[in-house]
Image (cartoon, rainbow, N blue to C red):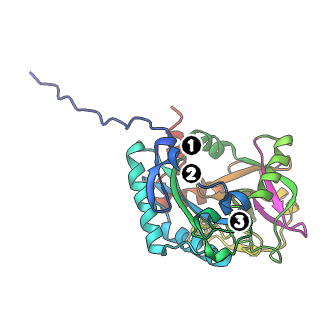
Amino acid sequence: MATAVQTEEKKAPARVPASEWFVYLNGAYILRKDAMIHFSDAGFNLGDGIFDCLRTARHKPFKLQEHIDRFYRNLKYARIAPGLTPDEMTEICLTVLAKNIPFMAEHDDCWIFMRATRGSGERGPKRDFDWPYPLKQHPPTVMANCTPLNFPPMARLYREGRRLITSSIRAFPAECLEPRLKSLSRQHFMIACAEVEKEDPEAVPLLLDIHGNVAEPYGANIFFVRDGELMTPSPQLALEGISRQTTIDVAREQGIPVHEGNGYKPYDIYNADEAFVTMTSYGIVSVRSLDGVAIGRQCPGPMTMRLLRGFGAKMGIDLVAQAESHLS
């Protein structure tokens, strides 16, 4: 008589609220709920700081080195000295991730954020006046943390696509601020989001430059497809996104011509065969419409899905399947 063999099912870790996850703050690893900065910190008072973020794929950081490199390029541009080498910052990110992996189930993943501000006057020499202090005299505030990825809304957007609305708020011209800068100050984006939300709470603003050329949506880069070729605004107009570059790499590996330009208009996107945005969390998400104008004949389009599969292959995961696994 055969004897049934019982196997113990691997249990997922108990859900731990993000407030109980670990963060790095100024030399210490502490619980997120205990992390505090001084009210006079330049990041809080002035939006004076730099950040970068990446995501994990099967609990492993995707393109960490590229994000570290961009973080330090931007710190140099902003004249903020973090007091840590790139290698030290890399180790901090890996340590924060390692401390939080036990809180994630096997099919979960997370963001990894790194931030540095010009610090607080309270941590430096005492002064008799408020900001601006002599900038170089104050220790920076440096943070790193993980945040769980929220997959259910990602699954819906993979299927349905994202709606964009052109905002009246314009992207910073290079004469004012370097478009490649990933600064803590997102004020122009937040005003654009508030403006667009009144018309469509689920839409995302698309910013143009001061000449009416397509620059970038909030939190993403935009691409559109025309006659089998791929077009995207150049880094002279938009953030030099790492997901953007990954998509360009995938496209070129697949023999798809890619054009980076400075003169694309909303008109070009209205009449595109397909459009999509690239971002750290999703990789690639199709654009269903711009200003209420449907893009292409189907959403997502065939090239969008082809590139999304190639993007996921570089990460070692099926991005859509992972998101949909969180729906049940």
Q: CA distance from mark 3 to mark 1?
A: 33 Å
The residue carrying pointer 2 sits among few (fewer than 14), some (14 to 19) or many (20 or more) residues within 10 Å by Cα, namely few
Q: Nearer the viewer, residue 296 or 236?
A: 236
The residue carrying pointer 3 sits among few (fewer than 14), some (14 to 19) or many (20 or more) residues within 10 Å by Cα, namely few
Q: Amino acid at mark 2?
A: Met
Instruction: First in sequence, mark 3 or 2: give its number.
Output: 2
Select label 1 or label 2 by which is in front: 2
The residue carrying pointer 1 sits among few (fewer than 14), some (14 to 19) or many (20 or more) residues within 10 Å by Cα, namely some
Q: Which residue corresponds to mark 1? A: 150
Q: Is residue 201 visible?
A: yes
Q: Is residue 7 above or below residue 215?
A: above
Which residue appears at 61% of the width and 55% of the height?
A: 38
Which x, y percent locates residue 90? 45, 68
Q: Is residue 65 above or below residue 149?
A: below
Residue reaching furthest to the front:
128
Residue range in magenta is 202-217
Residue 216 is covered by the magenta coloring: yes
Q: Nearer the viewer, residue 62 or 4?
A: 62
